Structures are given as structure tokens and as C-alpha cells.
Amino acid sequence: MKRLTEGFPENSTTLPAPQRRPAQILIPLIPGSDNETLMKLSAWLSQEEPVLFVGIVPVAEGENLSIGASPARALRELLNTHTDRENYRARARIRVTYTPWDEIRMVLASEPGVKLLLLNWPHHFEMMNLTPAELLSHPPCDVAIVRGPLPDKLQHVFTPIRGGPHAERTLRLALEIAAFHATQVETLHMSSPAVAPETEASYAGIAMILEEFPNVKQIEPATEDEVQSILQAAQNSELVILGTAAQPTRDTASFGEITDAVLTQAGPAVIAVKTKRTVHYGDTPFQSKAISILVDRWFAENSFHADEFADLHRLLALKEARGLTISLALPALNEEATIGDVIQTAQRSFCKQVPLLDELVVIDSNSTDRTREIATDLGVPVHIHQEILPQYGARAGKGEALWKSLYVTRGDIVIWVDTDVSNFHPRFIYGLLGPLLQRRSLMFMKGYYQRPYKNGDALQANEGGRVTELTVRPLLNLFYPELSGIVQPLSGEYGGRRRALEQMTFTSGYGVETSLLIDALEKFKLTAIGQVDLVERIHRNQPLIQLNKMSFAIIQTLFKKLERRYGHPMLLDVNRSMKTVMVEPGYFYLKVEEIAELERPPMIEIPEYRHKWSLGT
């Protein structure tokens, strides 16, 4: 084989008022300061975070405030010139004041959404009689101290990262500015005996995620002298971003030895960052904050909505342009009540209306009802998974069916959707396919949705997904925090590129979704995983005792992955039996069941599969 709007209400006569996001960045403009640098930086940051400008005219004590009229007019003209973009909004009234720093703090108190304050160095500090010690002691929010001038275009952004409380905010700012300029971030880390263990632990969290960013390059220190290494590396960049000292120094005019040296000696522009977060070494590990940089960005960039891909003709054009084939495999076990609707919906939308699917098959797990008969009557090939590759044995479980489906399908993209869904919609298919067709870098797609809990004939909103919320998400947050942004790791609607799926390990039962997610992360990195909102899914809910077994199997799967990661056995065979407390009228008893999540190797390792695809021995 060849490898390869929201609309307006129907009776509406007026447009709804636009919702303006609250400002997240505050920039004070002061006459005589380097306002041009602050305005330029605001243009770089306002793409994602709305900016609020406030004009501050300082007047010396004893002077009449009216002498501020002329500089106030000049500030208004400056604001009118630069604040006509959607993300900007300026104060209508300039503040003429004897106490400029107090005015800024008052503005911040009235704008709780502001998370970052930009200050110019040294002008703002001189004009406001503000000392570094006061700012380090009582920052009203996160603060970025800017020493310009800034060039119009950046080719390199450099950030030395020691660790500690400012590392996360510093890296976030560097990545945001680099994204605006479509350029690279260079990071430098120096370790020395003088660095606190907590700081090194912080950097360990940062280092864990740096490799996930293709635009981040880690460079080696030039010398053992930290200041000289930073100054030397800074020569190759147009902007240096670094943290200040975490606490005030003995010198009230100092931001810390390294920051002072960079502010005064570095050739390029400098931004020094001070976070508001209180430093309590030993309370909260700083590395736990670092991972949010990666997960937040992934969630924003790799989360889709099915509605984005509702134009099936556009998807067909993408498919043909890419030269891809697509297989839809439907795992089933006694689904006579719903499988007919699932098949007919898929045939109608993706075979008859728009020929998006090249193959539609049912992978049955030896159903005892009419499941296979219904599929066959609708013209769909049916494979019984216990009869596929029989030389490798027949195991029970959905994971076994998915693994064997790779052998009997031929598509370059393979997707699976559950067949017990009672509200099946075409978006369950095009929502998964759209991102894979649109973005070549995606290898694995997961669906997510609202999961109401069906209690008899009644539906309880947002009450489904009990194993997800009580077992899987907590464990992923603990051991695989990169996957903490996956909304529904156990969803049954997912798929990916064959060249990725054939390299993954499949467990036989309930742990298969967890196994595939972790493999996708470890083999292809987080950026190769996407998720798509499929709106709502209604299916039959499992009884609590069955969820107990499901959780047990998933925990086994995750611990097997951890055993491979750390090279140390964690579970013995004796741990693989489930002791369930059963309740009968008047007494309790234990029921012991063997629930062993057996694994299948990557399909690409199976000789028959390699022969089928002419992959050699």
C-alpha cells in the first residue's frame, strides 16, 4: 500500500453593544520620560492583552497645579495619536498631581484587571521619587521596568533565567514579545553553589518545558562570571529580559547586583521584571508555575471548535491538496440501539453529500445482539476483532479493537468514534478531521464536549465524566502536567495520522485512551496534540461499580508508563486484582476480579503489518 457566528437574534433591529475586555497592562506616560519606548512596547503587547494608558503630570510641592496644563495638553495629543486601535483605551482625564506614585496606585486599585505595570527607567523613578527598594517591597502588581530605546524590529530576544519567583513571568513576557516579531528567544542558565536549592528547583520546572518551544534556543554561559556571561550574550540581541532581585537589597537604590549591571551596562534595550507574588520558599514549588506557560499556550493554540470545520467542501479540498486518505473505524459491542444512526449519519454526510471518507468499517467485539447485522445491511464491512491477527491471541476490550483496526484499515488518517452515542452528529467526525487536515504538525486529536448524566429519562447537565474528574485528571496533573489542559482525556472520539498511531502502545481495555495520550506526548510532544469541542455527547452511563473497575485499569496503565519513564517496577502481579466490596441485604462480602491491562506493542512492530505496508523486515 502507498503511504502517504454568531448571528443576531431573528427579530433584532440593533447591533449588540461590543464587549470590551478589561485592561491588563497599565502604562503611565509622564512628560520628559521615554514615552516613545513605552508606546512601542505597548504595541507589541496589546495584541493579546488590552492596554490602559494614564497620563501623569508631576508637580512639585508648593507649586500651583495649574502649571501642569501645558504638559497635560501635550500628553492628550500623544494619547490621541497612539490610542485609536481597538485594544487601546486611554483615560479621558490626565492626572496632574503632587504624588504621582500614589496616583498610579489609585488607578490600579480602580482597575482590578491590570496584571502588569510598565515603568520607564530611570525617568519614572526620578520623577516619582520612587526607589527600587519600595517597588521590590510593595509591588502593586507585576512590574516591568523598561530601559530603552527599543528598535522597530527585533531579531533576537535574550533572557537569562536563574529560576526563582520571577522566572515564569520573565519567560512569558519574552515569548509574547518574540511571537509578535516572529523571532527567537535565547535563554541562558547558570548554576552555582551560591544559588539556593529552591531556585534550582524552579529552573528544573522551566527547563522541562523549554524544549517544547521551537522558537527557544538554550545557550551555554561564556564564562563562570554570571554578569559577564549575560552581558556578552546580550550583545547578540536587541532586547534583554530578566528578573530583579526577589527581595529588597541593602542598597535602597538597587534592583539586585545582576539587574543593576544589565540596566547600566548592556548595549540593547532591557526589561527587568518584578512579580507581585509573595516569595515563600518551601510553600509552593516554583516549578509548578512554570508548566502553566506551556499548557496555557497549548490550550489557546491547539483547542478548536467543530463549527470551524463545518464547511465539508473546504475540508475535501484540503484533503485532496494534501493527497490523503481517511478511514473511520467504529468500535462496537452490543450497540444495536444506536449504531444504525451513527452509520447512516456518517454515510449521508461524508460518503454521499461530500466524499470525505475513503473507508468506513465496524470493528465488532463479538456482539451478541443485532449490531453486526445492522451494519452489514447498511453496506458497511464488519470485522470481528477477535478474528483479526488471530496468531496473536484474542483479548477482550475496546483497546484491542482499536489496535487491530489499524491492521484492517488503509487511511493515512484514522479516526474512531464510539457507537453508543444517542445524539450523534456529523461534527463528531468533521470536528476531528478539520484540524488534522488544516495543520500538518498535528498528529493526534481528541474530542471533548458537555457530558450530561442520564438518570432514567432525565439529563443532569455537567454531571458526566466521573472517572475523568476523580481519577484521570488528578493523576495527569500529578505525573504528566503537560496534559493537564486536555478537557476530556477519556473521550471516545479521537484519532490521528497513521504514521503516529502505528508507533503507539495500545492497552486492551479501559486504559487505552490514557495510554495513547501519554504516548502522543512522549513521542511527538505536546504541540502535536490537539483537542476539539464537539458540543455535547449523550450516551449510556456506567454503574458506579463498573467505574470502579475502569479507574483501576486506568491507574494500572499510568503506572506502567511511569515504570518505563523511571526504569523502576512499581506494581507487582498481586496488585492487579480488584477487591470490590459488595453489599447484600444484611451483609457485606468481597468480590475479587483480575483486571490486568495488557499491552499491545506498536503496530509498526508487527511483521504482518510491515509486510502489508511494504515496510521491510
Image: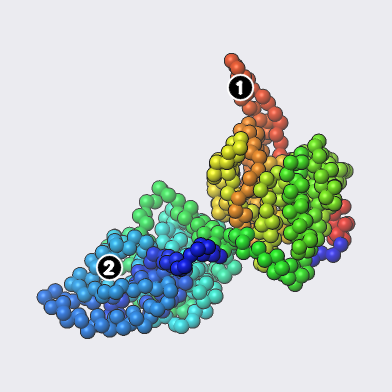
Tell whether label 2 touches label 1 (CB within 8 Å).
no
x and y, in percent, of residue 113 in the image: 37, 61
> What residue is rendered at 55% in x and 68% in y?
216
Residue 495, x across and y down, in percent: 71, 55
Instruction: Give residue 417's position: percent from left, percent from top.
Output: 71, 50
Which of the 4 image quarters holds residue 24?
bottom left
- Crowding near pointer 1: few (<14 within 10 Å), some, many (20+)? few
- Return the residue at label 2: 104
Q: Which residue is mark 1?
A: 583
369 relative to 27 in the view: left or right: right
Spatial CA span between label 1 and label 2: 65 Å
Tell which tag, 1 or 2, sits nearer the viewer. 1
Split into 4 quadrants, where in the image is the N terminus? bottom right
Residue found 20% across the figure and 70% down from its top: 99
Q: Is residue 248 visible?
A: no
Quarter that holds the C terminus: bottom right
- The structure residue drawn at horizontal position 60% and vertical position 39%, both measured from the top left corner, is 454
Relative to 126, residue 435 above or below: above
- Residue shown at 63%/31% (left/top)? 545
All told, the count of numbered labels is 2
